[in-house]
Amino acid sequence: MNNIRLGILCIIFYLAVSSELKGQVINIVPIGNSITQADNNHQSYRYQLWKKLIDEGIDFDLVGSMTDHYNCGTPVFPDYLGHSFDQNHEGHWGWRCDQVLNGTGSSANCRGSGSLSNWLQNYTPDMALIHLGSNDMFQGQSVETTIQELKDVVTTLRADNPDIVIILAQLIPTTLPSNVWITALNLQIPTIAVDMEDPLSPIYIVDQNTGFDATTDTYDGVHPNVAGEEKMAQKWREAIVEAMPSVNIEAFVYLEGPYNGSYMKTGLSSALPLTQPFNTIPWNYYGTETINLKPPGVVDWILIELRDTTDVSVAFESSTVARAACLLDSSGRILNPDGTTPVIFNKQSHYNLYLVVRSRNHLPVISAVPITETGGIFHYSFTSDINTAYGGPLAMKSMGNGKFALVAGDGNADGIIDTADLGSGWLMDAGKQGYYFLDYNLDSELENKDKDEYWYMNQGYSSQLPQEY
């Protein structure tokens, strides 16, 4: 085993990250019994997890032969952020591990039918969430037999997809006397990750037991209530994010307006909003990035994107796979909203990754070459070579000291510096102080030098981001 990470809420035995999870929709199969299926009065942890994965920006599809809940039908699943709940799963009420393997479990009341090998003929999961073994302990099966059957479940999944990521749960507790056997089983479950280590098919053991109170987090001592579903979903979310490949970015860029020859001035001060400003046209970015207090040395908010494609010339907007609102400090470093680096995306490239940097009122740029990883970090700087931006001198300006910066003056962020960038906004707001898009030097004052030294001097520049016509 390569690594053991201990946490207050979960214990994850980390073995590897499958290369097959890069740049694709992740098929996730939840496998279990009643705790996974839930009855028709309860939404299940799957619904809460589904919402959390949407929030994470992970491209995923829940798969499985089942959509019904026990006693048939389903509860109401409200849409979330324009999405309808994906109800597929392999939760089979009352089934033991051996019944999942050989299909001998009861099918009454919409428990489902078939076996794992049968189900896998209709889909191929990239990731499996397994919470199995409770019924085995309730019905007196030995810990040793159940561990072997859990191993057989893993073997069956790997036969279908040798690169599958396995997330195997230590079981939630119960108020029943058989909880002593669940405790004994949970102690042995991590040995599966050790005994079945495979770099192509990593196994994560997620502790669903710790922090789960069977008295307050279930409605009957066994099955999760809303609070229990939320706790389980959060543990699954943490494990899935841990299992996803990530892109850790350390990047630098200068903005012409606030750059003074050595660094960028931080003149926005208290005018800087605490919530990212890109949730409007033309960016239409609705991320929830906020700050409680402005970290020291912050120049402004910026928006960064990752585009995944074969060549920068075809790095169109449609190839964007991730976006994030970040902060820019006076040295040009791109920061997370909490002031830390690197910026982390739970994404990785299927082709090549290109970095796009957008400002409120400077022209955007895209890296001329793919960003590359060294020591776990993707480093890129637009500051010391004009050709680091696609379009070179058409995309950035020389600051006269061997440094280069994004071009100021695009007040309406349409990618062209022209008369539309002043418009009626200048007439209405000139002379005011605050957070204005026409404040090109970012000193929180709208004055003539914004117009004369930046907008007027830079008319004719336009965005060099590749356009798909």
Image (cartoon, rainbow, N blue to C red):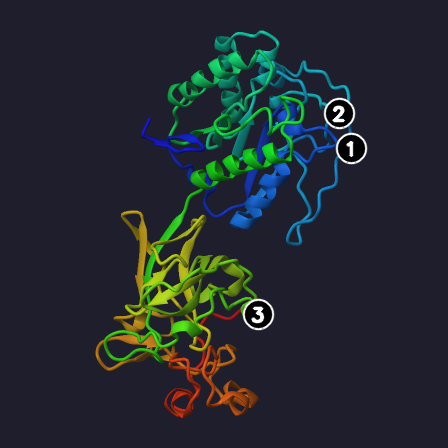
Dot 2 or dot 3: first in sequence order is: 2
Residue type at mark 3 is Thr
What's the residue type where badge 2 is placed?
A: Cys
* x, y percent for residue 302: 43, 67
Give the residue at x 64% y 35%.
Answer: 226
Q: Is residue 306 left or right of residue 93?
A: left
Dots 3, 1 in contact, CB < 8 A: no
411 vs 272: above or below: below
Vertical comparison of 307 with 267: above or below = above
Helix, strand or loop status at disc 2: loop
**Tag 1 residue:** 73
* Amino acid of disc 1: Gly
Residue placed furthest toward the front: 216
Discs 1, 2 touching: Cβ within 8 Å: yes
Q: Say which mark, if any, is on residue 110.
A: 2
The residue at 66%/41% (across/down) is 86
Q: Position of residue 130 (x, y in %)?
A: 54, 27
- Residue placed at 49% from the left, 87% from the top? 418
In three-dimensional space, the C-alpha distance between marks 2 and 3, rounded to whole angstroms, equals 46 Å
Instruction: Find disc 3 in the rendering and name its residue.
Output: 280
